[in-house]
């Protein structure tokens, strides 16, 4: 029992240290997530910074322009499907196997997420979720007030007015 307690204590302490380190990175505006949002890629010179990925950035601009013309997210999704614009997974070059029938189907939820993301304004938005403890697999979604938003960390794709 004493060895088990010691191992558990070590795991808990290590988890806290890692969590604190990532929190410091987020507060400094460094990317700590996995896959960057559509339109961005990780800078080869600095793994904590984004650079614009032209192919994805054009799709993001198209989505914002369609929304600016008062199209609903459902209408935007339909337009992108009809124009055979590839979904973000394909644009980013993910290697996972996809159902061939779904390759060109845009979800209104995906469009809504893109339109609501402050990342496209050049702000780093992170820390939207957490976990109860180092053993828990359950994801806890935090309220927007607790998110870590660092302003002007990378080049924006969309201007504030749009």
Image: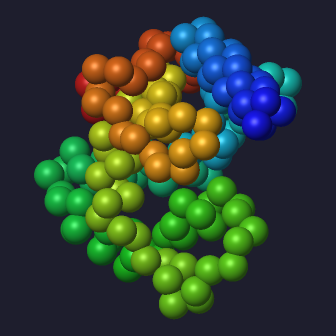
Q: Nearer the viewer, residue 6 or 95?
A: 6
- Residue 47: image quadrant is top right
The answer to whether residue 48 of the structure is visible from this angle is: no
Placement of 121 over or under 114, stated as above or below: above
Q: How is the image coloured?
A: rainbow
Number of numbered markers: 0
**Residue 75's spot in the image, x, y percent?**
22, 68
**Residue 18's spot in the image, x, y percent?**
70, 23
Identify which residue is drawn at 23% across, 60% down: 73
Q: Which residue occupies the extreme left position in the image?
A: 70
The answer to whether residue 151 of the structure is visible from this angle is: yes
Identify which residue is drawn at 45% across, 13% down: 151
147 left or right of 70 in image = right
Q: Which residue occupies the extreme bottom position in the image?
A: 101
- Residue 80: image quadrant is bottom left
Q: Nearer the viewer, residue 159 or 120?
A: 120
Placement of 49 over or under 7, stated as above or below: above
Identify which residue is drawn at 35% across, 49% down: 113
Quadrant for the N terminus in the image? top right
Quadrant for the C terminus in the image? top left
Placement of 11 over or under 25, stated as above or below: below
37 left or right of 116 in image = right
Q: Nearer the viewer, residue 33 or 124?
A: 33
**Residue 16's spot in the image, x, y percent?**
64, 20
Q: Nearer the viewer, residue 14 or 36?
A: 14
129 left or right of 79 in image = right
**Residue 116's spot in the image, x, y percent?**
30, 40
Identify which residue is drawn at 38% across, 79% down: 82
């Amino acid at each position: 029992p004493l060895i088990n307690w010691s191992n558990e204590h070590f795991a808990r302490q290590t988890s806290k240290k890692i969590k604190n380190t990532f929190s410091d990175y987020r507060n400094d505006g460094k990317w700590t997530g996995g896959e960057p949002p559509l339109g961005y890629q990780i800078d080869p010179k600095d793994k904590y910074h984004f650079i614009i990925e032209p192919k994805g950035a054009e799709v993001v601009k198209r989505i914002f322009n369609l929304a600016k013309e008062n199209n609903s997210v459902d209408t935007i999704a339909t337009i992108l499907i009809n124009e055979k614009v590839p979904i973000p997974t394909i644009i980013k070059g993910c290697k996972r196997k996809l159902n061939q029938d779904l390759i060109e189907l845009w979800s209104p939820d995906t469009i809504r997420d893109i339109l609501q993301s402050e990342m496209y304004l050049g702000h780093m938005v992170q820390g939207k979720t957490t976990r109860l403890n180092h053993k828990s697999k359950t994801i806890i979604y935090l309220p927007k007030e607790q998110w870590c938003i660092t302003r002007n960390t990378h080049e924006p794709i969309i201007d504030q007015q749009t």
